Image: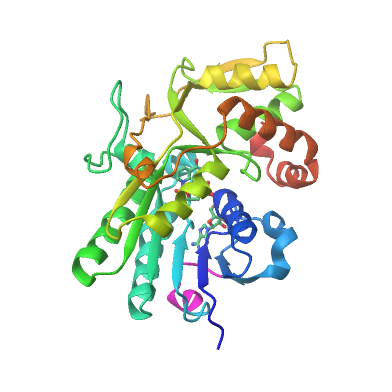
């Protein structure tokens, strides 16, 4: 019998999920990884192309319990699968409620029936809503603003209920805004990099002063792994690196990295319900022994370099999706 741990990673072809698969394979080459992903517009097999021979890949939908069952008996589940783009959720929330809430419910039921050893829900700082000057703690009230963050908050509550009702060994991570390789170019940092590379205007919502707390994706992956191995079941852990930046600062830094002196910044009409500032208190995960390893400026420089050098990855996305460049 194979004694190695079998780990199911849902949404493992997306941005953070694929970085996490790479992280686990580098750090624990002996573990068996099963990736289950619907391959929506945001999921790309190319994100895993260098490790396909080391994992089992299942094309499947977490909204469908029969697809999840194809993974067979697993020890651990990390749920990264979600619809994730706030602007899309404002246009049409239906698929967000289905995937982020119903999909999570299906996974929890699967976990419960299969005596899973640990279930880790990947959540977001957006569930807390916005704050002008404080930093959110894990036990603060949830006050989501968008259909996306409300769906993620609903999923978090279900995960908590499965702990209380069925004693399912769950953990929740809530990270701040991630950036790094393989992020779909509809999110702020890759949009700005690719627009700048194509000499197009860099769209900035409102007055550009909204603040996000940025974390390099590899630091988040290490944090998620820490929570899985050292966290206490039933608990929630914030994961942030304390890099609070306004959107305009991010745009200027990208232009500086690319040595583009021309000011391409263009202010556009603000998003409805746009949260002003996200900020996390991360003492709890730091007490487990985790701390971020990457300096923001170095990680942003590396990310700009990655997009500049990997046009094979984004060219087909731009070709298939004119919205990104209109
Ligand atoms: N990107 C961030 O800054 C950020 C910050 C905090 C939390 N998160 C959370 O981290 C997780 C991953 O985010 P991401 O940025 O990598 O997202 P992403 O949009 O890049 O990837 C999502 C992945 O989930 C898959 N997927 C979507 N619906 C599915 C379904 N019904 N069944 C199976 N697979 C499905 C997609 O194909 C894709 O591979 C999400 O749960 C998100 O809420 C993201």
Q: Is residue 298 above or below residue 109?
A: above
Pick out the residue farthest to the left. Answer: 165
Residue reaching furthest to the top:
262
* Region of the chain picked out in magenta, as a range: 60-68
The residue that appears at 27% across and 59% down in the rendered structure is 234
The answer to if 40 sits in the magenta stretch is: no
Q: Is residue 63 magenta?
A: yes
Give x and y (percent) for residue 7.
Answer: 51, 69
Along the viewing direction, whichever of 162 and 220 lies nearer the viewer: 220
Residue 5 horizontal/vertical position (percent): 51, 73
Q: On screen, 49 above or below 184?
A: below
The colouring scheme, among rainbow, by chain, secondary structure or one colour, is rainbow
Name the side, left or right, on which 68 lies relative to 283.
right
Task: Tell me what residue is drawn at x 38 percent, y 74 percent.
Answer: 116
Question: Is residue 15 in view?
Answer: yes
Residue in the foreground of this view, choosing between 164 and 85: 164
Residue 13 position in % (x across, y down): 61, 58
- Image position, residue 200 (x, y; %): 71, 23
Q: Is residue 280 left or right of residue 256?
A: left
């Amino acid at each position: 019998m194979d004694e190695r741990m079998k780990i199911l990673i849902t949404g493992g072809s997306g941005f953070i999920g694929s970085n996490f698969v790479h992280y686990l394979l580098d750090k624990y080459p002996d573990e068996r990884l099963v990736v289950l992903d619907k391959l929506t517009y945001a999921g790309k097999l190319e994100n895993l192309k260098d490790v396909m021979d080391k994992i089992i890949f299942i094309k499947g939908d977490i909204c469908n319990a029969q697809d999840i069952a194809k993974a067979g008996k697993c020890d651990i589940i990390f749920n990264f699968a979600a619809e994730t783009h706030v602007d899309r959720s404002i246009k049409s929330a239906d698929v967000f409620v289905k995937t982020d809430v119903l999909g999570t419910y299906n996974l929890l039921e699967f976990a419960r029936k299969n005596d899973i050893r640990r279930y880790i829900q990947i959540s977001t700082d957006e569930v807390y809503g916005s704050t002008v000057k404080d930093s959110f703690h894990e036990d603060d009230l949830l006050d989501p603003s968008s259909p996306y963050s409300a769906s993620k908050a609903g999923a978090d509550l279900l995960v908590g209920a499965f702990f209380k009702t069925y004693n399912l060994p769950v953990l929740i991570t809530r990270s701040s805004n991630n950036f790094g390789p393989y992020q779909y170019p509809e999110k702020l940092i890759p949009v700005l990099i690719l627009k700048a590379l194509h000499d197009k205007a860099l769209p900035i919502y409102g007055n550009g002063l909204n603040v996000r707390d940025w974390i390099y994706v590899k630091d988040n992956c290490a944090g998620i792994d820490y929570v899985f191995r050292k966290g206490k079941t039933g608990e929630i852990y914030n994961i942030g690196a304390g890099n609070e930046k306004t959107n305009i600062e991010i745009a200027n830094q990208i232009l500086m990295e690319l040595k583009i002196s021309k000011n391409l910044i263009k202010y556009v009409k603000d998003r409805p319900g746009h949260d002003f500032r996200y900020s996390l208190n991360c003492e709890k995960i730091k007490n487990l022994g985790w701390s971020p390893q990457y300096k923001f400026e170095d990680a942003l420089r590396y990310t700009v370099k990655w997009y500049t050098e990997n046009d094979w990855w984004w060219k087909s996305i731009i070709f298939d999706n004119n919205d990104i460049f209109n």
